Structures are given as C-alpha cells and as structure tokens.
Amino acid sequence: MTDPQRLADACAQTMFERDQASRRMGMNLLSAGPGRSSVSMRVREDMIQGHGTCHGGYLFALADSAFAFACNSYDEATVAIGCSIDYVAPARLDDLLTATAFEQSRSGRTGNYDVRIENQHGQLIALFHGKSYKVRGTVLAQETLDE
C-alpha cells in the first residue's frame, strides 16, 4: 500500500478492531491520517468520580488511544515510552469528548505527539503529550497472516 492516507486508515481501522478497551469505553475512531487521528467518547455515568466530573483516567485513556492510532499510522509497530497529561477543565456527564492527535516529530525509532481533548462546545478539557518508540513488526502483518 503506497498511498499514505489509505495506509493510515487501514492501520487505524485494524488497530481499532483489535482494541477491546477503547471500544468498551465507548470510543469511536473518527478519522486517521499519517501521524494524526481523531477519537470521540461520550462521558457516561460510570465514568463520573467523587467530585461529579469525568475521572481523569478516562480522559487519559481517550488521549492515549488517539496517540496510538496516530503513531501507528505508518504500519510500523509503535508503543508509548512516556506520556503526560494536563487537565485544563472538567468533563461532565453526557459531554461528547474528541481527542485529536498530531505528530510533532518522528525520527529514527522515536516520535512526539500532542493530543487535544475538547468537549462538544470546543472547550479545551486536557492536553496530552506522548513519546513513541518503534518496535519490531508492523500493524497490518497479523492481518496478512490470518488471511
């Protein structure tokens, strides 16, 4: 597959189909491209913590999923070697959150990605930074072996 957009789409779709955790949290893969992705999640009642807002772990998971789809978009198996998140504003019950990941750098085996989480009103909820590390293998190879 030589078209970068088609490759990124195929990688993201393949990973999302395998990703039970993201799907069970109600995430939806909205889009993917070379070094980028967008994922949404509605805040459910079971995601609310003791202060009445969305638990930060769910926000982290949403951002981490967007990061994963973005950094694996080149069909090179890539994992996180470090991540951080800044919580800017609370997410509330029934908010529709969108995490958008963008590649900032990619060289050798490592990459840097930033993710913005916004609610349905475009309000910034959190900023996430992830550092990726390329390991052996590809994203799509398993699909080829299964056919």
Image: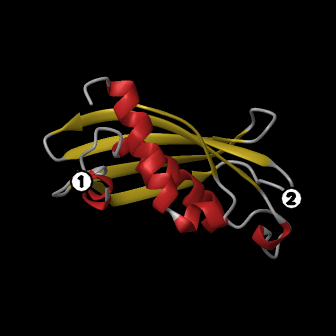
70 relative to 58 in the view: left or right = left
Residue pictured at 34% horizontal, 46% vertical: 72
Question: Which amino acid, by three-letter code, is at mark 2?
Answer: Leu
Q: Quadrant of the N terminus?
A: top left
Residue 51 in which image quadrant: bottom right
Question: Which amino acid, by three-letter code, is at mark 1?
Answer: Tyr
Q: In which quarter of the image is the C terminus?
A: bottom left
Real-space CA distance between mark 1 and mark 2, rounded to the nearest whole angstrom: 35 Å
Where residue 93 sits in the image (x, y, percent)?
86, 58
Give the vertical position of 9 relative to 24 (above or below): above
108 relative to 103 in the view: left or right = left
26 relative to 39 in the view: left or right = right
Q: Nearer the viewer, residue 79 or 17?
A: 17
Residue 118 appears in the figure:
yes
Residue found at the very far top of the displayed protein: 3
Residue pictured at 25% horizontal, 25% vertical: 2
Q: Nearer the viewer, residue 62 or 4?
A: 4
Q: Which of 38 and 143 is in front in this view?
A: 143
Element type where label 1 sits in the image? strand
Q: Which mark is residue 93?
A: 2
Residue 129 appears in the figure:
no
Residue ID for mark 1: 133
Q: Residue 120 carries which label?
A: none
Where residue 94 sits in the image (x, y, percent)?
86, 54
Residue pictured at 75% horizontal, 32% vertical: 122
